[in-house]
Every structure is written in structure tokens, then in C-alpha cells.
Amino acid sequence: MAVNKKIVKGIISAVIFCAIAGLTTLAVIKINATKQKGAAGGAFGGPGKTSWGGGGNTMVTSVRTVLAVPQTMHDFVNTNGNIETQTSIEVYPSIAGKVVRVNVSLGSHVNKGDVIAYIDPSTAGANYKWSPVVSPISGSILQTPVKTGQQISTGTVVTKIGDIENLQVTASIPERYVGDLKPGLKAEITLEAYPGQVFMASVVRVSPVLDASSRTKQVILNFDKKDSRVNAGMFAKVKLYTVDYVDVISIAQDAIVTTNEDSYLYVVKDDSTVEKRRITTGKNVNGYYQITSGIEANEKVVVAGMLTLTDGAKVKDITEGAN
């Protein structure tokens, strides 16, 4: 029995040794296969990811790029405004008394000279002829504040008349943009009632004075086209285009790398390496900087993956359609 135990222990030790040797061999084979795959060039991930390609000792960074193409930057200012009639007037009676008849209702059309209401100026013991309140212009009734039987004075507004066929937008522009204001500027008007719809308008008048309390200047805009969906009294969001910068190179501000108060962009060269280029910037319009020096037209500029780059680094452009 003692001899059999020794034989069994020997067999077990041999089996364990063979198993360990086999696992070690498989591990070595897998490591070699991985190295060979890396030596063949490897695979690239998203912008900023790297791999070892070529001979296995050159780091390559995946990036996305844009061509620096001259274009026009449209500077603008966002503000709010109110839609009003271009022509409106409040109508007052010529004599005090009691309102005995109202001939119009809200929204009804009147012509110049039409009788809007009659006022009875009679007092106790004295009867007088009814006095008519006449419309001074043609238009639509915007307000009807008085009621039949109401006592009014010559300072009471009987009604308000306006031309609802021709509407305008009144907006206030902050003081810092005043130097850019002039008639003819274009604007996009959006309304809460019609999300996604844009109504074009143009500046027709600019106030000659600045409001000292709000530090704003008022502008009046007329709609380029009449649209029955637009009503007087609506709240408007105004995107007013102020200055056009023509034939300028503009790059997204997120692509610009800042070091010690200097600004840089990475430019991809023909040999797929990058050059760290110092630049100067101009106006920032909606997240894009005007590049005033440092970049030439049609150069390829890195806009994603630049945070891990250094001057002369090797890159692979994974921009859609780049290859």
C-alpha cells in the first residue's frame, strides 16, 4: 500500500506540471499574437484615442478636422419686442355726458368719419342734442373701454382705432450695440404661438435718443410680408442681424487651445503630422471666432482630439469623408 501511494502522488504531480506548462504556453502564444496585431498598425478609436502603428513605436492620434474656408459671419443681437399697429389713435369725446349708444365692437372695421358712439350732454332740467363721436381714421377697433349708460368726460377714451393690416415690432436694443443700428437691418421674428416659424422683418426707424433708465435704444421694424397669423399685442423674440464680416476664416472656439494667454490651433500637414500654430482672434459670433492671423485659407484644422496633441504629432483624420 505504501508503494501505491507514492505512485499515485507521482502521477498527480506529473499531471499538475503538464497543466501549468500548457497554460504558460497558451499565454505566451496569445501575447505574441497581440504584439503582432499591434505591429500591423492597430485600430483607432474616437478623437483623442491613440494606437501604436507602423513599426510599433509611433503613437498616432485620431482627430477630426475642418477646412478653413473663408465665409461671411453674421453678427446679431437677441432681444424681445412687442407687435403693434403702425397707425393707432385713441378717440375722445368733444363733450362730457352719458354714453347712450355705441355703434362698434371689438375688432369691427370703421372708416374715417363713421360715428362710433353718441354722448348725451343733457343735465337735470336741460335737454341737449346727442353729440356724435366720429372716427378720425380708417381701421379696426382695438379697444372699447366705454359702456352704454356710462358717464364720461372729455378726457375719457371712448375707443382705440388701429390699422391691423400693417403691423410693426417695437424692440429695445442694449447700449453696447447702438453703434451698429441703422435702417435696413434684417431681423428674424419668432412667436410663442407658432414655434419653429420665422417671420422676417426690417428696421425702418431708430430712436434718436437713448433711454437713460434702461440704457437701451428703441427700434421699429416692419414685417417684410403680411401674415394673418401675426396679431397686434403678441410678444415677439427678435434676432437682429447687425454686422456682416465678409470673407473671414472662422473656427469653433472649442478647437482653440490656450496656453499662457496665447491661442493656438493644430494644422494637419500633408505628411499627416500636425503643426501647432499660434493665432490671433477677432470677433466671436455664436461660438465661432474670427481668425485674423495664423491660419491660411483651405488649411486643415483640428477641431476634435487636439487636447492630447503636441507639435509634430502623427494623426489619423477620422472626419467623415476625409479619406
Image (tube, rainbow, N blue to C red):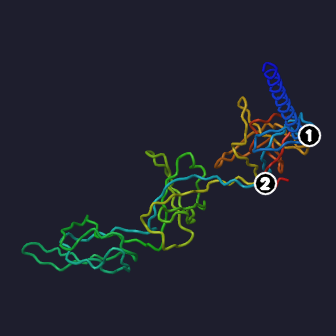
**What's the residue type where badge 1 is placed?**
Gly
304 vs 44, nearest the viewer: 44
| Crowd band around label 1 with a 10 angstrom C-alpha radius: few (<14), some (14–19), many (20+) | some
Left or right: 171 in relation to 96: right
**At numbered mark 2, what does the secondary structure look like: helix, strand or loop?**
loop
* Residue identified by numbered label 1: 54
Q: Residue 222 in the image: state x and y as whole percent.
A: 53, 66
Q: Quadrant of residue 148?
A: bottom left
Q: Nearer the viewer, residue 160 or 120?
A: 160
Label 1, secondary structure: give it.
loop
Give, as a three-letter code, the residue at label 2: Glu
Q: Judge whether 56 appears above or below 148 on screen.
A: above
Q: In this view, does 164 lie to the left or right of 202?
A: left
Circle number at residue 266: none
Q: Residue 124's quadrant in the figure?
A: bottom left
Task: Give percent across and percent down for residue 286.
Answer: 64, 49
Q: Position of residue 298 (x, y in %)?
A: 83, 51
Q: Residue 320 carries which label?
A: 2
